[in-house]
Image (cartoon, coloured by chain):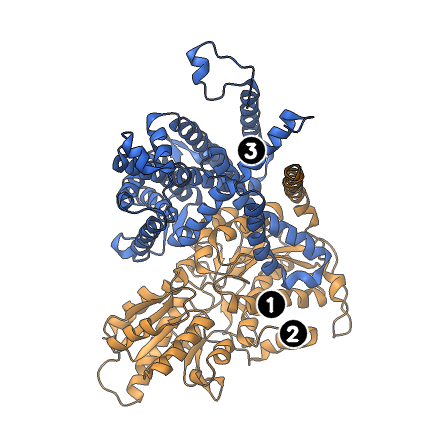
Chain colours: A blue, B orange
Amino acid sequence: MQSGTFHTTYAADMALRPYWPQRLRIALVLVAVLVFPWFADRYWLSLANTIAIAAIGAIGLNILVGYTGQISIGQGGFLAVGAFSAGLMAARLGMPMWITVPIASLFTAVVGAFFGLPSLRLKGLYLAIATLAAQEIITWVLTHGKLLGIGESLSIPRETSNIFGISMTAIGNPDFAFYWVTVGCLILTVIFVSNLFRSRAGRAFVAIRDQDIAAQVIGVDLFRYKLLAFATSSFFAGLAGALTAHYRGIISWERFTIDTSILYLAMIIIGGLGSVSGSIYGAAFITLLPALLSNLARLLSGAVPQINSYLPYMQQGAFGLAIILFLIFEPEGIVKMWRNVKDYFRLWPFSY
Amino acid sequence: MGNDQRRFGMLALLLALVLALAACGQQAPTAAPTPAPGGATGGGTTGAPPAPSGEPIKIGAIFDLTGATADVGTPYSKGQIAYIDWRNANGGVAGRPLQLISQDYAYEVPRAEELYTQFVTQDKVVVFSGWGTGDTEALKGRISEDQIPFISASYSAELADPAKTPFNFLVAPTYSDQMIIAMKWALEDWKAKGNTGAPKFAYLFNDSPFGRSPLADGTAFAQANGVETPLEVPSPRGATDLTPQLTQIRDFGANYVFLQNVSTPAALAIKNARSLGLDIQFVCLNWCANELLIKLAGADAEGVVGAIPFDPAAEGAKVALEFAKEKGIDYGGATSTFVQGWTAMSILVAGIEKTLADGKELTGENIRNTLQTMGEIDTGGVTQPIVFTETSHAGAKSLRLFQVKNGAWEAITDFISAQ
């Protein structure tokens, strides 16, 4: 890739982003993230929050599916665990957000590790069905909410959305205030997960993905690391769920069905398996595509009134079509497309 | 070499997506007034009233046209759109045109939230017409914060208390009231047929907040009247066979089954029950008691009882049905659902009209106060007059029960209230 770079210290060799263009890019992205909320209206802020929360959940799923190679279609269920445990703590005990969110994430990690137990014996599609069971069990517990004292939906009091006693309403409207929370959590998640795969545990995950028997032979404790992968992954699912609960102020199980799980899988496949930035691109793509299509539909309905009654169906079709086209033309996801673009400019005017 | 081409293609696609997104961000608000109401609908029938002019009054709406409840969502949306067109063809409201900003949300809560935010913050709609129970409840906090008078097609009792949801209005008896009314009828019917003892009740309901909404209140009423705790059987979304659910109901020995579902799954349940040879009386609440049910279940629908809060045979519905005929609006035969959509929108607009007539500024708070204080809103017999007060936003308290006789709904009771 990059040539002519010679590290002269261990610190430089270990750096997460060793090259100056990478650092410049990060600085630019950070500036954009800091500037964006001051110019965006509430609609775009709410989309940004949705993307940030989805990205945290997608990164979590990518740890499990993309890095460790364990298929999970139970992400919706784990999001629900995070959302409802944070919601119940806030609604019943009046605990503030800065306490409920970490506790809910940790609790989800425990639940995730529990449902990860079958992964020791099951692989591939069999494991997928086992995680599907996790999804169904969690949904069942929630729909029979009498067990937990939840009605059809759970309202989270606004005043519990405070950080160290500072009320969110003091910062501005909820979308603006939560932007800082969701994006802050996303940045921490990105830093943690990017570094995770430079650590012993992360390398063990990747070894398990590439060939679990070989990994075991070289001394990776499969059981321990598979459970750890499930726990880490679920931790971020719980974080995303807990943030959803506090941001939306009201949650019901309808938000965390099997459809949600599949949408999260779609995010990481479209974004790029085994890539942190890919998870973010995927989350943005899946969140923005329907919004984009409905805006497009509105423009069209003004111009061609007769088309109006077909638009909803075309919108749904276009969503599917876009996903299929992506998979055909770039199966490695958006992250690969971005890499191609970078390579093109780096090598220009020569093709290789 | 082919690789290069592909790379360019994808680059172009990516750029196009980004550009389109940026374009939409800026164009969405400015493009909003394009439907140009007055002009499009032309003269109308009654001596060409003056075309509405001035600043349009913006009304937001979300419809389910492709989701789990699209069978009734579609005719409801047609009724709402038709009412707006009809108003604009007849001079608008106080000379101003109405502009409906609507989108399909496929019965998905996150989509509903996104569209609501867009319509309220970008398009600055003053009132909103919603649809499902799950999404209306998910939005209730924001509705109160944004002060947007909101009439949805969900009649969940959760939304009727102005102390909790000051901007939600219900234009039909709550699902709980509907259930209690249906149970009252069932208890009388049981006695009238010469039975002794208490009948057994069961619920077969949509597996969603909509389906579960009336169960707790219904069960409390049943128990208070000496009926054994009714059996709760959820009907899974997208099911193609309800035999297991019906077998469960048969084994329980239910005499009356209350259907809180939309027409398609309800018709399926009725057909499955007939082929199993079950002798049970089905009672449909609002969203399956319509013409679609008869169309789908055919002869099997005979004898089914339904709670229809909006009577399509009433005098007030004629103008809606005539307008639909004139414009060739196809609502798939679901006359009562079409009329329901039309009437719900007319009540929302009645609030706007009165606010303007009183010379007040058109804000959410003023419209809310007007709706609360304007007294009876006459719907021409489609419903009992709708009354909202400062302590109750359940506008209607009573409805009539209908029964399918010879392939059509026929009223079998007078107006019954839950109290």
Local SS, label 1: helix
Q: Amino acid at mark 1?
A: Lys
Marking on residue B324: 2
Residue A324 position within the rendered picture, expressed as x and y whole percent measured from the top left = 55, 50
Q: Are marks 1 and 2 on the same chain?
A: yes
Local SS, label 2: helix
The front one of B58 and A329 is A329
Local SS, label 3: helix
What residue occupies the far top of the structure in this picture?
A8
The front one of B270 and B377 is B270
* Apparent side of residue A324 relative to residue B306 in the rendered image (left or right): right
Residue B418 appears anywhere in the view:
no
Marking on residue A187: none
Read off the chain for label 3. A
Q: Residues within 10 Å of mark 3 (few under 14, many from 20)?
A: some
Q: Which residue is mark 3?
A: A37
- Number of marks drawn: 3
Q: Is residue B13 above or below residue B296?
A: above
Label 3 – label 1 distance at C-alpha: 38 Å
Q: Residues within 10 Å of mark 1 (few under 14, many from 20)?
A: many
Q: Are marks 1 and 2 in contact (CB under 8 Å)?
A: yes
Marking on residue B78: 1
Q: Are marks 3 and 2 in contact (CB under 8 Å)?
A: no
